Amino acid sequence: MAESTDYVADFPSEIIREGRVQVLVPNLKAYGVTPSDYAPSKAPVFYNPVMEFNRDLSVLALQAYQHMVGHEVSICEPLTSQGIRGIRYAAEIEEVSNVLLGDISTRACQLAQHNIELNHLETKITLKHSDANRTLCNNASPKKRFDIIDIDPFGTPVPYLDSAFRALKNRGLIAATATDLAPLCGVHAKACLRKYGGKPLRAEYCHELAVRLLCGYMAVTAAKQDIGIQILFSHSSDHYIRVYAQISYGAKKADDNLKSMGYILHCFNCMHREITHQPFGCPTCQECGTKMDYAGPLWTGDIAGAAFVGQIIVENQKAPFRNSAKIAKRLSLIEVEPAMPPAYYVIDKLSGKLNLPAPSNQTFIEALKKAGYHAVATHFNPRGIKTDAPTLTMHKVLRELTSNQQA
Ligand SMILES: C[S@@+](CC[C@H](N)C(=O)[O-])C[C@H]1O[C@@H](n2cnc3c(N)ncnc32)[C@H](O)[C@@H]1O
Ligand SMILES: [Zn+2]
């Protein structure tokens, strides 16, 4: 990109501070957008202040990855908009060798170039006014590949994942955001099947299914290139989901990944769920005999690793972000989730089904533990729990809690 020393935005703009950087962004008030609205695309260049939480957490996760690999890292963010995310990576993460940013929009690139200069990062950051797939494919030869690629688009990351895997070094990290929750959560099931190759389900744990559908798509896409993936971290927040995966070159690793692809069968009558890796005809619920529905094919393996989440927690303790307390709370939930089976329950949904009053999270979790099962809260839903208790046992525990209250 050309020098932008004389850059003057031809739209209402303001300088904001986030993390350790300052950037010029569209002044959303001029577009009738309040910080809680999700309408940032009304401005000529995309900017969403609500995603500060996502960017803070991304800085921490990328720093945790850099510490894990223990060497300098190169980073590519090919859909950067005004550049805030990539500029923060260059300014805030230790041991970053270089950052390549790109965007297809001329105005976004002009603003991003200005912001790079505003933060005196011209030597560390290069900007390409280019389509994201072109940016990635231009860097797919072995010597040009990146340690980290962040795909942060409007909607689905699917169109960019194939080229992202090509442009990633062995043991590299891919981070992908998906904001198309209507398809992923089953409101537009056909779109989900088209884009992610799996059927969603409008069940109360649809946000976890969304993460698993994206992870599954990533695993299958990587496998085509003889690449395996390990999901280090993922979360569902606000209007989006985000997945961080480390890749490993090798056909065997890709084959092993495919073993984690499967289906979650769901009973809408008693809420029993089960995982299957086998083709199935017309499954009936083993608990109540009702015909079951299903989601998938999707990723049934781990969607976070406790050790990696632990390292993000350590990084967060050092970081003075506006969102640090919120991040700490979220990570403390995510850290214990990998040990639990997939498909969380929502207490109100379960008790509503049985026409019983809903207990508090703590009361229900303690009662399940007393009955001999594991149970933890989940970050996916403030009233959600993950447990290894069978569904009918949960019904029994809920009934007992109510009769104890009435006694
Ligand atoms: C959600 S915004 C990126 C937000 C940014 N990462 C942040 O944290 O603020 C998506 C950006 O992708 C750009 N874009 C859309 N299609 C593209 C394509 N095919 N190649 C490159 N950029 C594209 C848009 O111009 C927009 O700036
Ligand atoms: Zn059932």
Image (cartoon, rainbow, N blue to C red):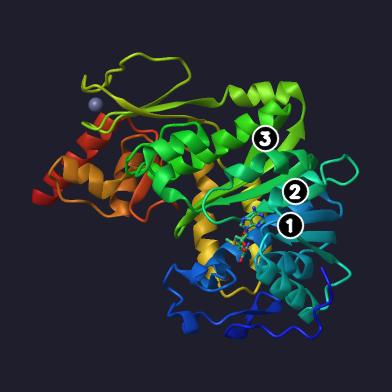
Q: Nearer the viewer, residue 368 or 50?
A: 50
Q: How far apart are the two marked residues, 2 and 1, measured between alpha carbons? A: 7 Å
Please name the amino acid that badge 1 sits on.
Ser
Q: In the drawing, does residue 70 fall left or right of residue 317?
A: right
Task: Ligand 1: give its quadrant.
Answer: bottom right
Q: Position of residue 7 (x, y in %)?
A: 75, 83
Tell us which disc is closer to us: 3 or 2. Answer: 2
Q: Position of residue 335 (x, y in %)?
A: 55, 49
Q: Residue at x 70, y 75 (%)?
A: 111
Disc 1 C-beta below 8 A from ligand 1: yes
Please name the amino acid that badge 3 sits on.
Ile
Residue 343 picture quarter: top left
Q: Is 43 above or below relative to 293?
A: below
| Contact, mark 2 vs mark 1 (Cβ under 8 Å) | yes
Q: Nearer the viewer, residue 305 or 203?
A: 203
Q: Which residue is mark 2?
A: 134
Disc 2 C-beta below 8 A from ligand 1: yes
Q: Residue at x 61, y 29 (%)?
A: 220
**Badge 1 element:** loop
Q: How far apart are the two marked residues, 3 and 2, measured between alpha carbons? A: 23 Å
Q: Residue at x 22, y 31 (%)?
A: 270
**Residue 252 visible within the image:** yes
Q: Position of residue 208 (x, y in %)?
A: 44, 43
**Badge 2 element:** helix
Q: Which residue is mark 3?
A: 229
Residue 394 picture quarter: top left
Please name the amino acid that badge 2 sits on.
Arg
Q: Which residue is mark 1?
A: 130
Q: Is 184 above or below relative to 37?
A: above
Residue 390 picture quarter: top left
**Badge 3 element:** strand
| Contact, mark 1 vs mark 3 (Cβ under 8 Å) | no
